[in-house]
Image: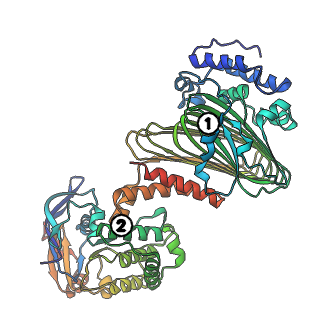
Amino acid sequence: MNAEVRAMKTEAEKALAAAYEAARVRLPGKGALSALRADAFHLFENQGLPHRRVEDWKYTDLRALMREAYPLAALPDAAAKAKAKGAGALFSGLDARRLVFIDGAFVPEMSDLTSEPGLTIGSMADALAKGGALVTEHVGKTFENDDVAVALNTALMGDGAVIRIAKGSAIKRPIHLVFAPGSDKPSSVFVRSLIVVEDGARAVIIEDHDSGPAQVNATLELIVGDKADVSYVRATRAKALHVASLLAKVGADVTFNTFAFASDVNVLRNQNFIRFAGERTKAGIRGVSLLRGKDHADTTLLIEHAKGHCESRELFKSVLDEQGHSVFQGKIVVKPHAQKTDAKMMTRALLLSDEAEADNKPELEIFADDVVCGHGATTSAPDKSLKFYLMSRGIPEAEAEALLVQAFVDEVIDGIADEGIRKALMFAALRWLGTHA
Amino acid sequence: MAFLEVKNLHVEIEDKKILNGLTLSIEKGQVAAIMGPNGSGKSTLAYVLAGKSEYNITEGDVLLNGESILEMAPDERAAKGVFLAFQYPVEVPGVATMTFLRTALNAQRKTRGENELSTPEFMRLVRDTAGHLGISQEMLRRAVNVGFSGGEKKRNEILQMAVLQPKLAVLDETDSGLDIDALKIVADGVNKLRSPDRSMVVITHYQRLLNYIVPDVVHVLAKGRVVKSGGKELALELEAKGYAQFQGEAA
């Protein structure tokens, strides 16, 4: 760690460094955890905020987007708690276990902590402070990389969820992590969560972010044991800037499905680092972004097939109106010896306006010789002949277009196994379409 | 007054002239066959009646019940009773056939200021009609035309026609791609919809379809205009002599 320290240039970089210096002593975690923060901060110091000349961040120039870094959010007060009562409404029809976080801080008194065999729920701040076995074993180790956003999160991580689902336990209701905004003042939030699903366990987890005017950096480490069945859904709305990182390590014979839903996002970077570390796992990595105004959503995937005989399907769609901008960077890496890998990645963008922009960058990096891998990308306006067909049956133009957009989006949402979540997201998409001019 | 009047219609697509002063009248309740060689403008006429926007109408008019429809969007024409059974029905992924039928019917009724049909009424209407056409419940649940065979797609067109109950049905080469059994089912479906209140334009290249859907009149189209009109026996004459006799005349 004696690389040359790069001069801090931007206001935001200086502010983040100052925030780390000031908070370092009171941030939870000692010893190895505190060293982990220091190393991560060092990585950030060396590289600075990623910008457009950094290939992985080409389309989401954090340095330009973050003119300033907001101060770290304070703990939620009574007013913030009162406001957060109605949070998570997107899934209000769902019978789920609701866990509430305000500006990243766990609020036990607003959360459903009724006990269930095999399920342990705690706060990340507590776990870090106590130096518990789970965090010491996993935090920062699930998918090591040199991503600056993840490093910043590690350096400044405050609170979040720590959930353990014990071997063989089937959790009955979806676990709904509701991340609500606190004060209306611009602040920055570094949420860090850890979910460990042990061998043979089953769980449905929803991470539901309504980011308000904050700069949010939310990172989840997800460890999935052999023969487990995990569905992970992330829904994001953000008025300012939201960087979400999923770091996942998935074992053998797992059924693994993720879904990312974005609408009403000012700037969203949704990055997913997923490693298949065991054989015969089947995975569906999917998502939908609905963008209008100047919304920007960047979906970046690094799917690593480290072991053979796994099947992964990646499907991401975006609908873009006005000056909406979607980015898809998907990379599938097949490691040497990961034979019989079957991976197919597809991304589709539907442009409803001439000013919308979709950038698609699929990549395959294959080091094994007996694999089936493919990728595809399309960008188009709604099909004219389809629209004419619907209109010729009496359906007015706006309704015909809405029907086609809905069908476009529903094709992905349909892949969600949980009926309640599927309905909630279909309804959310419908509502977005209804409010679109 | 005829129900449909096409007056001196001139139509171009991408600067190529397709219809060249076409004039045609169809009476209320009449079934008119339009026959003609490839490239004579049959499908263009069908699309122009339905309101497809790619066509450039340089001259002439189309009156439905005395009212010009050329400025109307396709959905407005549909609400006025125009229906086109497509030669190549498109697949609409993600839109279930039932949803599609219902959205279409209710949109038309709304435009006409009528009440929307209740769910049980609608279900009964569709189920009865689908049964006659050999369309299963499973097909109705599937996305419109997705994974349907050529024959199933054509039957689905007739189902839509039966549900929407148009005043002017234009059938564009409904016989193309059908084997004899499928042709009989489709023709049977069309014949059931014959009514004194419904005019039909049956566009076909071959006389065969007209054995099953017997027309009141036959018009022959060549080079973008009607070159001959007559009774149903004209179709037989064309079958025997071919279209060559008209190819020169209209030039």
Of the pair A175 and A367, the residue shown nearer to us: A175
Q: At x 70% / y 45%, what residue is drawn?
A: A110
The location of residue B80, given as percent across then percent down, is 26, 70
Q: Dot 2: few (<14), some (14–19), or many (≥20) neighbours within 10 Å?
A: many
Question: Is A302 positioned to the left or the right of B115 in the image?
Answer: right
Circles 2 and 1 on the same chain: no
Query: What residue is shown with label 1?
Result: A79
Question: Is A5 positioned to the left or the right of B193 in the image?
Answer: right
Q: Dot 1: few (<14), some (14–19), or many (≥20) neighbours within 10 Å?
A: few
Quarter of the image that includes the C terminus of chain B: bottom left
Of the pair B209 and B50, the residue shown nearer to us: B50
The location of residue A284, given as percent across then percent down, is 66, 52
Q: Chain of mark 2?
A: B
**Up/down of B106 relative to A235, above or below:** below
Number of numbered discs overlaid on the protein picture = 2
Q: Chain of mark 1?
A: A
* Observer able to see residue B202: no
SS at mark 1 in the image = helix
The location of residue A421, given as percent across then percent down, is 62, 56
Q: At x 55% / y 21%, what residue is drawn?
A: A68
- Quadrant of the rendered structure where residue B39 is? bottom left
Q: At x 28% / y 60%, what residue is drawn?
A: B52
The location of residue B99, given as percent across then percent down, is 46, 68
* Observer able to see residue A154: yes
Q: Amino acid at mark 1?
A: Ala
Question: Is A16 positioned to the left or the right of B141 in the image?
Answer: right
Q: How is the image coloured?
A: rainbow
Q: Give the CA separation, mark 2 to mark 1.
A: 47 Å
**Up/down of A226 relative to A239, above or below:** below
Query: What residue is shown with label 2?
Result: B107
Q: Amino acid at mark 2?
A: Ala
| Closer to the eye: label 2 or 1 | 1
